[in-house]
Image (cartoon, helix red, strand yellow):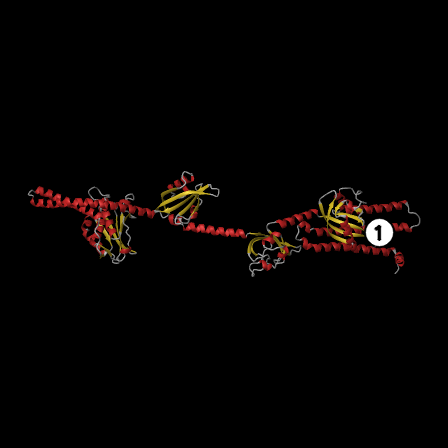
Amino acid sequence: MPIDEKQRARQTRSPGTLEKEEARLWRVALMFLVLLATALAAVSWDYLQSLPGYVRALPLALLCVTTSFSAFAYGRRKRVYELKELVRGLQEKSGTPTEEQLDQLGQVISKSQRSFKELIDSIDDAALATSLDGTIRTVNRRVTQLLGISYSNVVGHKLDEFLVEPTRDDAELLLSRFIERRRWSGTLRARLKQNARVLYFDCAVNAIIKDDEVAGVSVLARDITEEREKEQRFTELFETLQEGVYFSTPEGTLLEANSALVHLLGYGTKEELLAVDPLALSCDANQGPILGRTSDEPVGVRTREITLRRKDGSPAVFLDTSRAVWDPSGKIIRYQGTLVDITIRRDMEEALRRQEEFQRYLLESFPDLILVIDLEERYTFVSSRIRDLLGYRPEELVGQKLEEVQDHSPELVSLYRDVSSGRNMFEVSEYRAKHRDDTWRTMRASASPLHNAKNQVSGVIISVRDITVEKKLEKQIIQSERLAAMGQMIGGFAHELNNPLTSILGISELLQDESGSEQMRKQLVMLHQQSRRAAEIVQNLMYFSRPPAPGKTQINLTDLMQRTLHLHAYSLRKNNITVDFLPDGSIPSVDGDTHQLMQVFLNLILNAEHAIREVRDRGTLRIRLAKENRTALATFQDDGPGIPPEILPNIFDPFYTTKRPGRGTGLGLSICKAILREHGGNVEAASGPGGGAVFTVTLPVVGARGSGTNSGA
């Protein structure tokens, strides 16, 4: 159809038809604008979920603003329709319009303009309209605030008068693309001339159409500078963190990773890492994607240690802290978290653990007790050796002060204070300590200062050794050496005295036969008896210095004990002493000399008899035989006064006696010990549990002589 015919057709249309068509176009345009904002919000929703919360609200805000603007525009269209009706009525009426009609028309127009101006001024976003050459037609209050000038100084000026960026060339390029599509939305970077700060705007640009041609541009721009700067700071932080940061799907597929994580896993680029299969990061192929979660796992914050496979296949231990991110419907769309490489830390901890275990095993295996005491006199470390030495558990002493411990040793406290005060750098002390079983032990302690990492004294370390057995052996060695020296001396004296005594005995016997006087004969008899007694003493001295070697016969101890008791039965009955002896035929035989062992038993019986007579008129001597391993034991227990603890270590010394002068020489027990030593046995003394003294004789049984130990003094 020719153009003239189209124009005539439009002119012939009724005004009502035109109004309906215009209303329909308005509804379609506004509906399209709302749908466009809705589509923009839906498309950008998934991407914006990875950004902070204030950025995620941007699509919703744009949708709300667009809807409000559409509703307002549709309402303003009715006002315009009323205005048109008024103008049309004026035109249809004949004659010139009255002044009242003109005033009415002016009021309607002014009211409409004010309402529209108030609407766009109430919008927080910047709103403006320009012609195609960049001349500003109208702006709202937000634009004037950004430019810092009044409305009248903005309208009618070119847009590039106020902008440094985008430049004129950039604007023309954008305009050429815009005219084709007649709408555009996106983020625009801008910089004003009076402000060097770079600004960012989220813009929605639409064409102003006149006669089906683009006559201008309307812009609605929301200032997102602060959000963009925060986003940039977040991105910078994301990329500069030393810890690995990642986003992953619930199935474990990596969505995003920072440079640190790419480096930690040994990949060259982020794209290379993101393209890796989730299973390739797991060291265990049967484990599944290690960054994912199963449906039964809690969806809150999760902190755990995981092992990831690097690109080169080596394992790396990470501390993983992650949390879930939900969409508006409550569905988990991804997980975000951090990975801290703790491989070196775990290796160091493992090495330190092995070192600590080695030190602990070393201290536990050390034969000495190790004590560490701080400067407040508190135990900070006690090795488990204390269980064997004193019967304590280490935890019973740790934290306690030295003097708070029951049965503490003052010598140990003094040793600690000498070293901790700096008076001595190294100190050794011997002291007695009480075991929990009420026995006393002899200890030797060595103390030295303990220094910390700053080479400052932080305490005292003490090494304690139980030397009870060593002290006992030392006393036995000293006793043996003393007995050996005394034996040599006594042997010389005995030989020197034996010859004169032999002469005295012989001459006294001759003189008794030749003496005619009874008084003289009695005196010679007394002389002979005393000489005989002196000869026996000399004989005992010689026996002590070198006892004769025992015989090799086998002896039944039960028979030998009975024969000894028969020899001394009269004296025991006379002194009202009851003998409690139970023969035991199961006792094996021993190798020895019958006369010498009988002398030992007789001497012990005599000692028991004398001890009982000192305190009471009658008493009991209990004799028992037993076998222990490859040793035969004979125990003599009386109910006399017992042996005082202070003299117990000395009763086997030569010439040591508790009897009154003239009642003993102090050689009996020492001779017994010497005889038993030659037999490979020993004799020990102790106080009985109910009083009295207990002497225990030990002898090796037949066949065990070679393995018997010489326990003599």
Q: Which residue is nearer to you in this view: 178 or 79?
A: 178
Q: Is residue 70 visible from the viewing direction of this image?
A: no
Give coordinates of residue 140: x percent, y percent: 77, 46
Residue 507: which quarter of the image?
top left
Q: Circle 1 is placed at which residue position?
A: 81
Q: Quadrant where the N terminus lies?
A: bottom right
Please tell me whether residue 224 is drawn above or below residue 417 in the rendered image: below
User: Please, what is the three-letter code of the amino acid marked with disc 1?
Assistant: Tyr
Helix, strand or loop for disc 1 = helix
Specify whether 117 is left or right of 237: right
Q: Position of residue 255 (x, y in %)?
A: 64, 56
Query: Is residue 189 visible from the viewing direction of this image?
Result: yes
Tally of numbered tags: 1
Residue 412: quadrant of the picture = top left
Residue lying at the far left of the rendered structure:
516
Going 72% across and 54% down the picture, which residue do you hit? 40
Instruction: Please say if 421 is above or below 61.
Output: above
> Where residue 539 sits: x, y (%)?
18, 47
Q: Position of residue 259 (x, y in %)?
A: 62, 52
Mark 1 crowdedness (10 Å alpha carbons): few <14, some 14-19, many ≥20: some
Q: Residue furthest right?
A: 95
